[in-house]
């Protein structure tokens, strides 16, 4: 059974034309899929719709075979979905450790909560070094790591990430996506990674989907996409 799938998904804003039209997706458990496309292609709209933050016009969103396309966001979180939105949302007044403890609050036993936070420090040594630093003093890369670590604390089965590399130095992006890939491989989590940074995204993804004006123009193994000059020039910009 697919971990996440969509059938005929159509979404838009107000009474405008649909931004995502008749979109189909099938992600088997453990798949890491890059969602590519230029600015305005509809990546954020799609991720927000999957997470339940944007109403579906028509079509279906299935998580582990259950149609949750009209379910509230919190039901989807309970079903194992997590979204790391664009913009590295962390609580800037709190320290790294406090942010992580909040992310682990749903674990009722303090010892289990602490162990989960320590596990995140093992994944992100850069965060451990900054555990007592306030959120507002973190670099962009540290903030993005913290946002990702908070999402991972929930132990999601499906993780949606919206342009985590935006504004990060290449080596920081590589480090972040490396942790993401390792953590997906270890837990069997399914990942949908929206990125404009095509090379980085395809270096960690098994498969790439290229969106253009809300429609899928390619859905292929990552290595194929990198190797196809026509597609690269037309949609990926390199
Ligand atoms: N809140 C909104 N209201 C109206 N139109 C929007 C809104 N958010 C995004 N759009 C439009 O939807 C389209 C897709 O945007 P978006 O999903 O943000 O694409 P991407 O994340 O790929 O850059 C764009 O044409 C954008 O202008
Ligand atoms: Mg976007």
Image: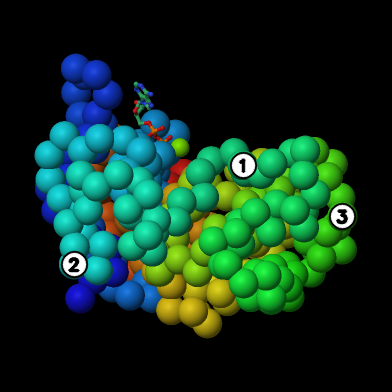
Towards the viewer: 102 or 144: 102
* Image coords of residue 125 (percent x, y): 79, 69
| Residue at figure coordinates x 25%, y 35% from the top left | 55
> Which residue in the structure is indicated by mark 2?
65
| Residue at figure coordinates x 50%, y 74% from the top left | 184
Ligand 1's image quarter is top left
The image shows residue 161, relative to residue 120, as above or below, that is above
Residue 167 falls left or right of residue 131: left
- The picture quadrant where one finds residue 40 is top left
Q: Specify whether residue 231 is in view.
A: no
Q: Is the CB atom of the residue marked by disc 1 within 8 angstroms of ligand 2's nearest atom?
A: no
Query: Marks 3 and 2: in contact by CB < 8 Å?
Result: no
| Residue at figure coordinates x 50%, y 69% from the top left | 155
* Image coords of residue 47 (percent x, y): 37, 46
Query: Marks 3 and 1: which is nearer the front?
Result: 3
Mark earlier in primary sequence (2, 3): 2
The residue furthest top is 15
What's the distance in space between the residues labelled 2 and 3, CA to CA? 42 Å
Towards the viewer: 99 or 222: 99
> Which residue in the structure is indicated by mark 1?
89
Q: Specify whether residue 73 is in view.
A: yes
> Which residue in the structure is indicated by mark 3?
132
The image shows residue 86, relative to residue 121, as above or below, that is above
Mark earlier in primary sequence (3, 1): 1
The image shows residue 29, relative to residue 18, as above or below, that is below
| Residue at figure coordinates x 27%, y 55% from the top left | 218
What's the distance in space between the residues labelled 2 and 1, CA to CA? 30 Å
Q: Which mark is residue 166?
A: none
Disc 3 secondary structure class: loop
């Amino acid at each position: 059974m697919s971990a996440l799938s969509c059938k005929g998904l159509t979404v838009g804003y107000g009474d405008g034309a649909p931004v995502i039209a008749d979109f189909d997706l099938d992600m088997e458990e453990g798949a890491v899929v890059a969602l590519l496309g230029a600015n305005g292609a509809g990546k954020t709209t799609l991720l927000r719709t999957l997470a339940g933050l944007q109403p579906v016009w028509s079509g279906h969103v299935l998580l582990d075979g259950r149609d949750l396309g009209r379910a509230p966001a919190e039901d989807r979180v309970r079903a194992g979905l997590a979204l790391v939105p664009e913009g590295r949302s962390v609580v800037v007044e709190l320290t790294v450790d406090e942010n992580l403890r909040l992310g682990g609050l749903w674990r009722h036993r303090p010892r289990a909560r602490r162990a989960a936070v320590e596990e995140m420090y093992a994944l992100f040594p850069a965060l451990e070094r900054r555990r007592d630093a306030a959120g507002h003093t973190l670099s962009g890369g540290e903030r993005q790591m913290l946002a990702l670590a908070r999402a991972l604390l929930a132990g999601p089965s499906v993780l949606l990430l919206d342009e985590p590399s935006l504004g990060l130095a290449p080596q920081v992006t590589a480090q972040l996506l490396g942790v993401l890939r390792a953590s997906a491989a270890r837990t069997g989590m399914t990942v949908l990674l929206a990125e404009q940074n095509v090379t980085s995204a395809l270096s960690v993804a098994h498969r790439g989907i290229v969106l253009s004006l809300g429609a899928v123009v390619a859905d292929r193994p990552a290595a194929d996409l990198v190797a196809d000059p026509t597609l690269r020039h037309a949609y990926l910009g390199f």
